[in-house]
Image (spheres, rainbow, N blue to C red):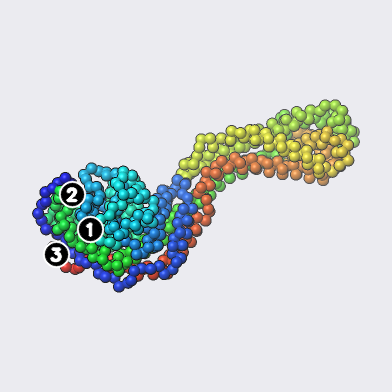
Amino acid sequence: MTTPGDSATRSGAPAVAARTGPPDAAEEPPATIGDDSLPGALAGLRAAIGASRYPLALPSAESARHTATALTDQLDDYLLPRLARLDAPLLVVVGGSTGAGKSTLVNSLVKARVSAAGVLRPTTRSPVLVCNPADAAWFRQGDLLPGLTRTTEPSEDPRSLHLVTAPALPAGLAFLDAPDIDSVVDANRALAGQLLAAADLWLFVTTAARYADAVPWELLRSARARGAVIAMVLDRVPAEATDEIAAHLAEMLAAQGLGRAPLFVLPETWVDGQGLLSERITAPLSDWFARLAGDADARSAVVRQTLDGALAALHPAVEELADAADEQVTAADGLDERVRAAYRGAERTVEQGLKDGRLLRGEVLARWQEFVGTGELFRTLEARIGRLRDRLVAAVTGRPAPAAELRNAIESQLVTLLRGVASEAAESAYTGWKAHPAGAGLLDPALAHPSEDLPERAERLVRDWQRGVLELVRVQGGDKRFVARTAAYAVNATGLAVMIAVFASTAFIPTGLELATGAGTTVAAQAVLQAIFGDQAVRTLAAKARVDLLARVRTLLDAEADRFLARTADARTTTDAGAGLREAAGRVELARHRSGLTTGDGDTALAADEEDPR
């Protein structure tokens, strides 16, 4: 067929392939749902699909997102509304390649120019649905294809559905002219696939020049895998090549398991002044559809087969989604473990720093020696514990002591350690993610370094810990009378000694390393604290203070790790997404078998006469 502007008509009788007789009447009555749980099971499956996420850049992710969208569309567009109204008009979606003549064919079958046809491609317009006036209410209410806005006028918006009534089209049957399946516009191709998935019957239109193209066959195989009922139109066939091309196409259909699909062959011809094909050309196809429209059992069989095929196809598709969801969780777990390992290493470094004497070096050591006394004092301390106690009390109550300098030195040393381990952990976690395809897609350059406010938070952590140590001394000190007698000065001095004690690995049983590092520092602290609190209290205070510090450090580092972990959270919206999908699909499959839908045989209902009029 040519463009609507051509008014001449070329002679030639139509050639109609075999299997184009009237559809046989099906023996089964119109389908009914035998188990009310099927719509509920489908609603549960839809919820499970909607809850699944595929944010990580894995090989299966893009396909899973596409499949999830397609399944959700089919549930909303077709399965749920069709289950609610099995007796609704049969929807025939007319699909095919660019320039195959779909719109001209639809116009000719309904005997009116309801769908724009032309040579300009791509045609960006809304899809057109044509039905008998008696069926308009069903399509207008929007249960079928609810995502498309109904309109009674042509529109440039492909997300609207142009509804047209045609009295020449028998009641019980509707045609939907879909966009080209191979359109250069991505949105058109996607919409074409969505509309085809909402069809009770697929009418595929191809031409003598393009019937072997790959794209239509991919869709045909997909349709057959889903059990959809299909009919074929081979258009614009030269008279001299009719037998050869029709036979070749029939062989191709049979090879793909589509040998029972009705095949109509339309000759190369011209359209009239209205842009319509001659009724003589379209008569076999028009008659075939008229018989289908008039046979409620045949229509029911078509609906049953397509509906059951779509339901059966859900299970393997959902299984693929479940596998992809499991892969997301597994990948997220792997990425999270790289982060946690990096920050666990940071915690171990801090803990080791409290054991190996490194924090007793430098400024802390100097300030502690200054605070407690001179080297001569260290050598004679153990024999003069009582005098030292008196001296300590006099120092904290009578004259200024360098307590503030010691506290600042402790704070500075700890903050420096925390900043260092946080930097190393951030770099390690960043490198670990960068080496993983899914992790690399989540990275931000800022993650390679600690948070900007980490220094402030580390300083606050140490100050809070120091206050906690003082409170620990005040509340849990062994000699309450000493604490009460010397008030805040004794608490402060004793608390500083406890902080120094935390930096010793053996809770004031000095090792050779500690003695060498602290030049007797731990011995002095031990003597002071034991003189005031007793040996066991010393150990208890130091142990509690160390546990408290490590807990605060862990909280700080966990917050740093959360900068990474928050980025994998979408992949683990629910860690059992895969199991949830499989369970939902299993409920649908069970309800499907209970529903009785499997008794329909649309291929038998559409089987054409064996006589070949060519």
Residue under numbered circle 1: 168
Q: Residue at x 37, y 63 (%)?
A: 85
Q: Is residue 551 above or below residue 96?
A: above
Residue closer to the observer: 414 or 88: 88
Q: Are marks 1 and 3 in contact (CB under 8 Å)?
A: no
Q: Earlier in the sequence, mark 2 or mark 3?
A: 2
Residue under numbered circle 3: 613
- Crowdedness near tag 1: few (<14), some (14–19) or many (≥20) residues, C-alpha within 10 Å: few
Residue 327 is left or right of residue 155, and the answer is right
Q: Residue at x 17, y 60 (%)?
A: 283
SS at badge 1:
loop
- Crowdedness near tag 3: few (<14), some (14–19) or many (≥20) residues, C-alpha within 10 Å: few
Decide if residue 120 is in sight here.
yes
In the image, residue 407 lies at what x, y percent? 75, 32
In the image, residue 40 lies at what x, y percent? 46, 62
In the image, residue 562 lies at what x, y percent? 58, 43
The span from disc 1 to disc 3 (Cα, nearest Å) is 26 Å
Q: Is residue 498 above or below residue 136?
A: above
Q: Is residue 286 above or below residue 119?
A: below
Badge nearest the viewer, 1 or 3: 1
The span from disc 2 to disc 3 (Cα, nearest Å) is 27 Å
Q: Residue at x 65, y 42 (%)?
A: 555
Residue under numbered circle 2: 275
Q: Residue furthest bottom?
A: 27
In the image, residue 241 lies at what x, y percent? 13, 55
Q: Is residue 120 above or below residue 14?
A: above
